[in-house]
Image (tube, rainbow, N blue to C red):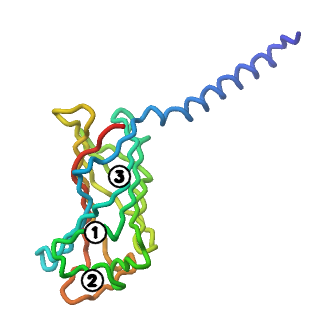
Amino acid sequence: MNLNPSHVARSKTKCLLGAAIMLLGISPAYAERWTLTPKSEVGFEIKSMGVQLVGGQFKEVQSVMHFDPKAPQQASTQFVLNVDSLQLSKPSLRHMILGEDLFHAQKYKTVSFKSTRFTALGPDQYRIAGNLTLRGVTRPVVFHTSLKPNTGNPKLLDVQSSTQIQRSDFGMKKAMGGVGEKVNIQLKGQWRVQ
């Protein structure tokens, strides 16, 4: 049996490296899996000269978040929104909003977001960077987010999150009689642990 010290040292190093790789691979699994509750709202508003012109909520949302407040750098989240499920504050504008100049819903059925980085800013406050895909165009965005433990239910996190985009960055028509270029995207509601 070979008990050469250098051979033993190499074996120990390999074992330690293997254990480290396993721990790195397993560690994200400790983050709990969350989904949005049905009462949560994902939507947007477009303003013109400071006044809301139209707002909308996506009624069909697929969502998942892996999150442990003790290790936010390992967190991740992803959304897929069904464009046809959009409910507007002004139904008379539905044809225009879902038409070719804006969402072009006939061709692009979903809007999606996938996070790339969670950054803790302070107690319950996070900066969530990621990629938003709208009309087949993917661009980086940042959501400013509050994730607070619900005082009445430990299985819930209260969430408020928002970002602002320029419509034309995603191929939407820039000049449209009174429709503002800036769009506020918002999420408010609760995440429930699975």
Q: Which residue is mark 2?
A: 95
Q: Which class describes the residues within 10 Å of circle 2: few (<14), some (14-19), or many (20+)?
A: few
As helix, strand or loop, the secondary structure at mark 2 comes to helix
* Residue 29 drawn at (x, y percent): 48, 34
Q: CA distance from mark 2 to mark 3?
A: 32 Å
**Could you tell me which quadrant the C terminus lies in?**
top left
Q: Quadrant of residue 99?
A: bottom left
* Left or right of residue 46, residue 106 in this image: right
Viewer-nearest of labels 1 and 3? 1
Toward the right, the furthest residue is 1
Mark 1 residue type: Leu
Q: Which class describes the residues within 10 Å of circle 1: few (<14), some (14-19), or many (20+)?
A: some
Q: Quadrant of residue 163?
A: bottom left
Q: CA distance from mark 2 to mark 1?
A: 12 Å
Mark 3 residue type: Ile
As helix, strand or loop, the secondary structure at mark 3 comes to strand
Q: CA distance from mark 1 to mark 3?
A: 24 Å
Q: Which residue is mark 3?
A: 128
Q: Which residue is mark 1?
A: 86
Mark 2 residue type: His
Task: Mark 1 and mark 3 in contact? Answer it, CB < 8 Å.
Answer: no
**Could you tell me which quadrant the N terminus lies in?**
top right
As helix, strand or loop, the secondary structure at mark 1 comes to strand
* Residue 181 drawn at (x, y percent): 26, 79
Viewer-nearest of labels 2 and 3? 2
